[in-house]
Amino acid sequence: MVLGWLLGCQIGVALAAPSASAGAREPLPPISFSAGSLLFSGERNGQWDLFQWLPQPCPDGTIVPLTCTPEPEGNPVWWPRHRLILCSRRQPDGRWMLAALRLDGTTAWSLADPQGNLGWPQPSPWDDRILAVREEPATGFVQPGWCDFPNGRFQPIGGEDDPAGGQMAWVAPDEILITRASAQGSDLCHRTLSTGEERPLVQGGRNWLPAVAPDGGPPFFFTRRVGQTSSVFHLWPRSDAPWDYEPCTLGRPYDWQPSVTPDRENLLFLSLRDGRFRVVWRRLADGQEQEIPLPGFTGVYHPTWVAP
């Protein structure tokens, strides 16, 4: 299902709502959000569009629509270098393309590929490269690649014999994190772009959705799913493979889609709570969490923070 692949809606398991934790604790004071706004894709009235959530006025903030198009958008990410929102947008013929939007929601750029669907854009903090993946509609094969903004075409990373690849993230100008299909599910790998050297960092289970600081580099996070439990993990670099990692979120039935705030001090992610996905803001220094209220949506995905 192409829509599910690009919007990130395919879970494939039935999950029960988490039970309340035992023992009463003193409530923590509300989190003071960093300057900026939450960018996300949301479904209202059967239509997927892009939205912003502004922290003011407190305590519930303000939801501002960015797009209102007949075709859905997904995978939004903020590109500070060009002050643009990159996303996936479905074309009238059903295929997906990459698009860049201004903060007022108007389209500044788009890129379609004759061979398939394009999605999961990840812009470089240092230059005009955009990491993305291409899905071949006939086979469902997902291939990682990149393009040069604004005039370059999609160029695959690796060869035809490489396993299917998924979401990516920038580590350095010549280094990325990349998900690869494996016999165990999926491996999280490190790749040097100039040499093509690629080595697995985390294996066993399904390891995907890497997240790094918006200006590149640490802190590093990824989603790991084993059985019917999915959590966000903190990834610690080492000079050899594999890298070290440890749980970051609270191990509820389903935590995923992590995103690091520009100040590197907080983490946004989706969490299945009380039967639906919520956007959670987690302060990394002490683990304090707060849900961002987004009423009126039947689906919310791809939270990321936009700094002014």
Image (spheres, rainbow, N blue to C red):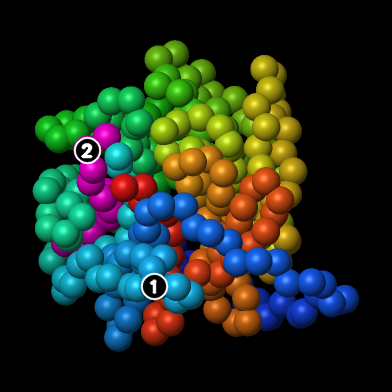
Residue 150 located left or right of residue 137: left
Question: Eyeballing the image, is 3 above or below 20?
Answer: above
Whether residue 82 is in magenta: the answer is: yes
Marker disc for residue 82: 2
Q: Position of residue 202 (x, y in %)?
A: 67, 37
Q: In the depicted view, which residue is nearer to us: 70 or 55? A: 55
Above or below for 58 versus 215: below
Task: Give whichever of 260, 56 is nearer the camera.
Answer: 56
Residue at 18% across / 72% down in the picture?
68
Q: Which residue is mark 1?
A: 57
Q: Quadrant of residue 238?
A: top right
Q: Earlier in the sequence, mark 2 or mark 1?
A: 1
| Left or right of 152, for residue 282 | right
Q: Amino acid at mark 2?
A: His
Left or right: residue 125 versus residue 110 is right
Local crowd at mark 1 within 10 Å, few (<14), some, or many (≥20)? few
**Residue 45, how many percent across, how many down?**
30, 86
| Secondary structure at numbered mark 1 | loop
- Pair 2/1: label in front: 1
Please determine whether, in this image, residue 15 is positioned above or below residue 261. Answer: below
Disc 1 marks a residue whose amino acid type is Pro
Query: Which residues are the magenta region?
Result: 81-91
Residue 115 shows up from this direction = no
Are there few (<14), some (14-19), or many (20+) residues within 10 Å of tag 2? few
The answer to whether one can see residue 108 in this image is yes
Q: Label 2 to label 1, Cα distance in Å? A: 28 Å
